Structure formats: structure tokens, C-alpha cells
Amino acid sequence: MLNATITPTELSRAIPYARYECLYGTVFDERASALLGAKVWRVRDTFKFHVCTTDQDGDVWAVVPEGYLSDGSSIPSIVWSWFPAWKQSGRAAIMHNYLIEHGEMYAGGRRAICSQTLAHQVFRLALIEEGATAWQARVMYNAVRLWGIIRPSRKFGYSAIKRTLEREWEFGAAKAL
């Protein structure tokens, strides 16, 4: 499903965001972590987040496919106590990483462009749905915007090795994790 147009059937099979349990829906991938030089987790089941409904396109969804590799939140450990824990913000972080890396969402079942600005806004909405307070969501939203300016590309996010590892999962070569 990586980099493919999503069908209505595939969209209906994706786990709704509220039911996707990040602690059980992701698995630490030792092989990918060693190859990429960073701790990464693999999404085990496709999940979706309803962004909005528009008159023109109908429902707009952010969809994160199974097999996607993410490093989670990239915030300094010194501020971890001020923000939602991994189990509270992990889904939002993974979804944000996917939207930034791939720049796509789905509107009316068709692929649509997702800008960095929109990805940040979706991240903020997802954090609020996770239970973050308004100020926590606002601070994290501003932090990812600032981080995007300071460090515009993620070291492993765009690598050919990462894409190969994700494709291996898609075609069944890594499902033994």
C-alpha cells in the first residue's frame, strides 16, 4: 500500500485512529534500526485519521500504511515531562512523520497533496484527540514548525535503505518480526 492510490475498500479496512493502539500497533525493528543508525518502529497495521469533510472532496483522511518506519517524536529528552508520553502522542508523531515524508493524504478516495503546514496542523489536531491540552498541542505544533526550519530533512526519512525496508515489509519479506 505504500505510495499507492487507496481504494474505498482499503480505506474502510484501515483501523480508525481512536482504536489504533500505538504500543501494540508498532514494533521496534532491530534490523531497520541497525541499518538506519536510529531507533525506529514499524507500523504493523494501517491506520487512518479523519482530518475533515469538505463540500468539494468529501472526507479527507491521513492514512499511515503498515510497514512504515518511524522514529516517533524528535523532541529533546529534557522536555519529555512537559508533553504527552509516547503512548499518548505516538500515533500523532508517526502520522506527522508520514505526512512530512510522503506529502500525501486522501480526499474522496484520491491522493491529495499534503503540505508541511497542513501536516503540522493535522499533528496538532491529532494531539488534541490524544488528550493533550490546548497549550501542549500548541507548543508541540510550534516546535515541529520550528524544527522543520532548523532541520528541514530527516536524516533517514528519505533514504533509499528506508524505502527498501518498507517495501520488503509490504511484499512479506519482513513480516516475521
Image (cartoon, rainbow, N blue to C red):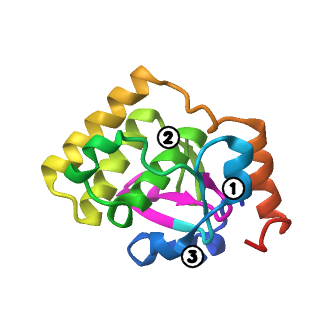
Return the disc, 1 or 3, that comes first in the chain's sequence: 1
Find numbered disc 2 in the image and state the secondary structure of the residue it sits on: loop
* Percent of width and height locating residue 85: 31, 60
The type of residue carrying mark 2 is Cys
Q: Quadrant of the C terminus?
A: bottom right
* Percent of width and height locating residue 41: 58, 58
Asked whether the viewer can see residue 70, the reply is: yes
Among the 4 quarters of the image, the one containing residue 163 = top right
Q: Which residue is mark 1?
A: 5
The type of residue carrying mark 1 is Thr
Return the disc, 2 or 1, that comes first in the chain's sequence: 1
Q: Which mark is residue 114?
A: 2
Could you classify mark 3 by the number of other residues whose Cα lies within 10 Å: few (under 14), some (14-19), or many (20 or more)?
A: few
C-alpha span from label 2 to label 3: 21 Å
- Residue at the image point whose x is 47% and y is 24% from the top: 151
Return the disc, 2 or 3, that comes first in the chain's sequence: 3
Left or right, residue 177 beside residue 143: right
Q: Which residue is mark 3?
A: 12
C-alpha span from label 2 to label 1: 14 Å
Callouts 2 and 1 close, C-beta under 8 Å: no
Among the 4 quarters of the image, the one containing residue 51 = bottom left
| In the image, residue 49 lies in the stretch drawn in magenta | yes
Q: Quadrant of the N terminus?
A: bottom right
- Is residue 22 or residue 171 the one in the foreground? 22
- Residue at the image point whose x is 42% and y is 60% from the top: 90
Find numbered disc 3 in the image and state the secondary structure of the residue it sits on: helix
- Is residue 97 or residue 117 the one in the foreground? 97
* Percent of width and height locating residue 129: 28, 64
Q: Which residues lie in the magenta part? A: 48-69
Among the 4 quarters of the image, the one containing residue 155 = top right
